[in-house]
Image (cartoon, rainbow, N blue to C red):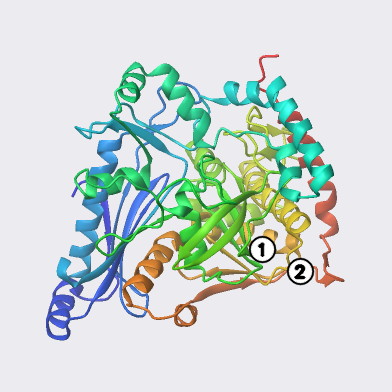
Amino acid sequence: MTGLTAKRHAKGNFSTMGSQRNGFNKEMFILSVDVGTTSVRCHVYDKEAKCRGSCSTKVVALYPEVGHVEMDPDELWKEFISVVKGAVQDAGIQMHQVEALGISTQRGTFTTWDKKTGVPFHNFISWQDQRAADLVKSWNTSCTMKAIHVMMKGLYFLTRQKRLLAASLIVFSTQHVTFRLVWALTHYKKVRQAVAEGNCCFGTIDTWLLFKLTKGRVHATDYSNASSTGIFDSYQVWCLSCYLLFFSMFLMADQQAAMFGECCFDVGDVKITMGTGTFMDINTGSKPHTSVAGLYPLVGWKIGAEVVYLAEGNAADTGTAIKWAQDLELFSVVQETSAMAYSVRDSDGVCFVPSFSGLQAPLNDPKACASLMGLKPSTTKSHLVRAILESVAFRNKQLYEIMLKETQIPITKIRVDGGVSSNDFVMQLTADLFGRKVARPQCHEMSCLGAAFVAGLGVGFWRTREELKKLQSTDEEFLPRSPLKEGVDIQSQEYIAILQSWERALRRSMNWYSKA
């Protein structure tokens, strides 16, 4: 299968050995697929949550115009089928040995399609897409929004409900589906016509895959994906027919799945996924968090009658910035970057602002630009790499501080996953800036594992969450070099001035693409 990568997880001819063993023991497995921003991955998990076979392929992003990010829906479907077949083959098992299928998907990426034929009207419009930035800005600065803010402040004054205070400060974001959907309705005549005829289906990636898997019989989504769109009311938990069990198939949004994979089941548990972007989530329990600084209330998962909520902050360009640096040939392989950063004492005054897709919470500026500042004749590749890696940890600190300030929830544990978490420099600096221990699991692909856990619990493959916790493995724990003092982290003195310089660079990068 061209473009696919299959991994063996045991010595010798595992396919043959697996077939023999599985044939005699009738061993059962959980299949899990993660449709990410840069790749589609499928893993086969056994009872001990060990990966017995896997297959992955790259997602080809399309950039038809500046700021536009798309994916081909039909190609994504083909990639989904290919990795499922590849992982099953790699594990040396038969499809009848798969007890359940878990699927985690990137959020906020959507398309529309013909209800009768199933043919998409346009490509997937990615969560990274900026085509609606001007529309978002016009709404955020409109008289209508100002009137809503004033009205909500008045209602808050009368009721003291924090949710109304949040509404008085709300601003829209390009990451929400709503404005990109408005853009599509405005610019695609076929979509408008299909809507008028009642023949238009809308959906995020989970909905599209479900529609394809059921040959058009099911058009639905789940709570976790729906709560990330900007259309779903997380406070009322209504709007769509969600949380799906269909022929032992379970859907989940990628960050919520990663949270579940990290076994962050308790209030105060924090998960940080550093992949294409950074997503920091805290378990807020049975109530959604009301934010005034850009943290987003999400449904983490709904199992039975229980609904668990998360509060999330994100930075959109983490892996994106590192891949950009690699394309510029600042380094050959990503594994070199940590050693390069440690090879110099500091960044030589260079500051990097990782905002190819604008700046998210707590700054919330879609018009910000990515930038390198403080370049000198003495600046080397190592200085540039260090500045880029530092910016990842600095954004982590911004998100962490706003999360602490807003939620007022005592942090119980911090677990970090995603491809960028393999970088020891970023991990150690994050621990130093937090003033807390951060743990990295052996497996970085938590979205896949989380979807598998949910599917496995749903069919009784695993019985309890306590059982799942016992299956958890930690690769390494990073301890802060500056200890906590009265619950407040003490930053290394060397980073106070560096952070201040970086924050100045951040402010100068803001509103760069404004036409005003």
- Whichever of labels 1 and 2 marks the residue nearer the N terminus, that label is 1
The answer to whether residue 254 of the structure is visible from this angle is yes
Q: Secondary structure at mark 1?
A: helix
Q: Is residue 56 left or right of residue 126?
A: left
Spot the residue most to the front: 158
Q: Residues within 10 Å of mark 2 (few under 14, many from 20)?
A: some
> Could you say which quadrant of the image residue 322 lies in?
top right
Residue highlighted by disc 2:
481
Q: Is residue 268 left or right of residue 178?
A: right
Q: Secondary structure at mark 2?
A: loop
State the image coordinates of residue 484 (x, y, percent, origin top left). Answer: 81, 70
Which residue is at 76% across, 69% downward? 481
Task: Check disc 1 and give the amino acid type.
Answer: Gln
Which residue is at 20% across, 32% downward? 116
Q: Is residue 298 left or right of residue 39?
A: right
State the image coordinates of residue 267 (x, y, percent, origin top left). Answer: 64, 69
Q: Are marks 1 and 2 in contact (CB under 8 Å)?
A: yes
Relative to 499, say whether 450 is above or below. below
State the image coordinates of residue 384 (x, y, percent, origin top left). Answer: 64, 41
The answer to whether residue 339 of the structure is visible from this angle is no
